[in-house]
Image (cartoon, grey):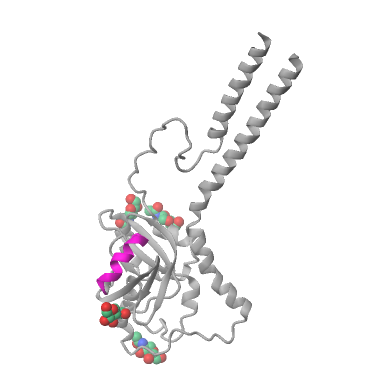
Amino acid sequence: MELSRIFLFGCSALLLCTALAYGATSPPAPVAMSPNPAPAPAPAPAPAYVNLTYLLSVAGPFHTFLDYLESTKVIDTFQNKANNTDQGITIFVPKDKAFKGLKKPSLSNLSDDQLKSLILFHALPKFYSLADFNELSAKGPISTLAGAQYALNFTDDSGTVHLDSGWSKTEVTSAVHSTDPVAIYQVDKVLLPEAIFGTDIPPTPAPVPAPDISPAAAAAADSPSADSKESSFSPKSSPSTSSSERITNLGICRQLVLGVLAAGIVLFF
Ligand SMILES: *[C@@H]1O[C@H](CO)[C@@H](O)[C@H](O)[C@H]1NC(C)=O
Ligand SMILES: *[C@@H]1O[C@H](CO)[C@@H](O)[C@H](O)[C@H]1NC(C)=O
Ligand SMILES: *[C@@H]1O[C@H](CO)[C@@H](O)[C@H](O)[C@H]1NC(C)=O
Ligand SMILES: *[C@@H]1O[C@H](CO)[C@@H](O)[C@H](O)[C@H]1NC(C)=O
């Protein structure tokens, strides 16, 4: 009688514990381990309003690009596209460092219209996920928001998206935001259009010797792109940590209950 009561108590405690362990860490995505067929996560809600000014002010740093967006009023054009869920927008944002590194053709003597076109040149009038660039790269020059003569060439090199404006050859180093209708991708260089700077491009743009940069500084300058690439895809790793955490919780819990159960049996006899 007494023994079976202890077993009953132990078993229900074990069950309760299991349920608690599963419930304790609320996972961001539904986990296959879940025993009860929980209803699918709420059907994708209407995409929330994306405040570009806010997003660009907290990511990056993209302050220089944001300053240009505001001084040229292009921010209104971009935000208008971002609000339009039918088409959306894809923006390539250079980090502050890219503007600092810009020496050869300077932006300082551009007219207001040229500066506006240059900023508009950093966006496509449609939402493209990173996977879409594979298809886009076969289509030749793609018109930007600055107009048809302001085109960019894309190539997708096994998942890395390369951009070519003639003057600027760069690549997407991180996805800041990529949810239809708004895509914001970080790039390493300011995109300089041939329509402003001409087709007389200096021949050797690729190898930058940078003799005045110490190796440590060069390494530091190199790492952010790798870091940001990792951080932008980090959500992949979080589910595994949370599920392993859940498994350890469950293990500890089970051991506790089994210990109590064993103690009960020993006491009884
Ligand atoms: C967008 O964010 C900026 C900066 O945080 C803020 O000043 C502005 O009021 C926001 N706009 C809207 C429409 O919420
Ligand atoms: C975009 O939508 C927000 C929120 O609905 C609104 O406050 C803002 O004025 C809109 N901006 C533009 C440029 O359409
Ligand atoms: C800016 O100035 C440089 C010379 O300092 C000149 O070569 C270039 O054409 C100018 N650019 C524009 C857009 O006027
Ligand atoms: C884009 O590629 C085409 C060939 O597909 C080439 O003729 C053109 O010059 C390229 N444009 C730029 C800006 O690189």
| Quadrant location of the C terminus in the rendered image | top right
Answer whether residue 48 is magenta in the image: no
Q: Position of residue 237 (x, y in %)?
A: 52, 52
Q: Residue furthest front?
A: 269
Q: Is residue 102 left or right of residue 79?
A: right
- Magenta region: 129-140
Q: Is residue 100 left or right of residue 166?
A: right
Residue 76: in sight, yes or no?
no
| Quadrant location of the N terminus in the rendered image | top right
Residue 57, compared with residue 97, is above or below; it is above
Question: In the image, what residue occupies the spot 52% across and 38% down?
Answer: 26
Answer whether residue 139 is magenta in the image: yes
Q: Position of residue 120 (x, y in %)?
A: 32, 71
Residue 260, compared with residue 207, is above or below; it is above
Out of 149 and 246, give the one closest to the viewer.
246
Q: Is residue 33 left or right of residue 14?
A: left
Out of 67 and 31, give the one closest to the viewer.
31
Out of 98 and 7, give the one closest to the viewer.
7
Question: In the image, what residue occupies the spot 28% across and 53% down?
Answer: 85
Residue 121, compared with residue 246, is above or below; it is below
Q: Position of residue 88 (x, y in %)?
A: 30, 58
Q: Position of residue 177 (x, y in %)?
A: 41, 58
Residue 56: in sight, yes or no?
yes
Q: Quadrant of residue 199?
A: bottom left
**Badge count:** 0
Ligand 4, by image quadrant, is bottom left
Q: Quadrant of residue 68?
A: bottom left
| Principal secondary structure, stretch drawn in magenta | helix
Question: In the image, what residue occupies the spot 60% across and 21% down?
Answer: 11
Question: In the image, what residue occupies the spot 54% across and 42% down?
Answer: 243
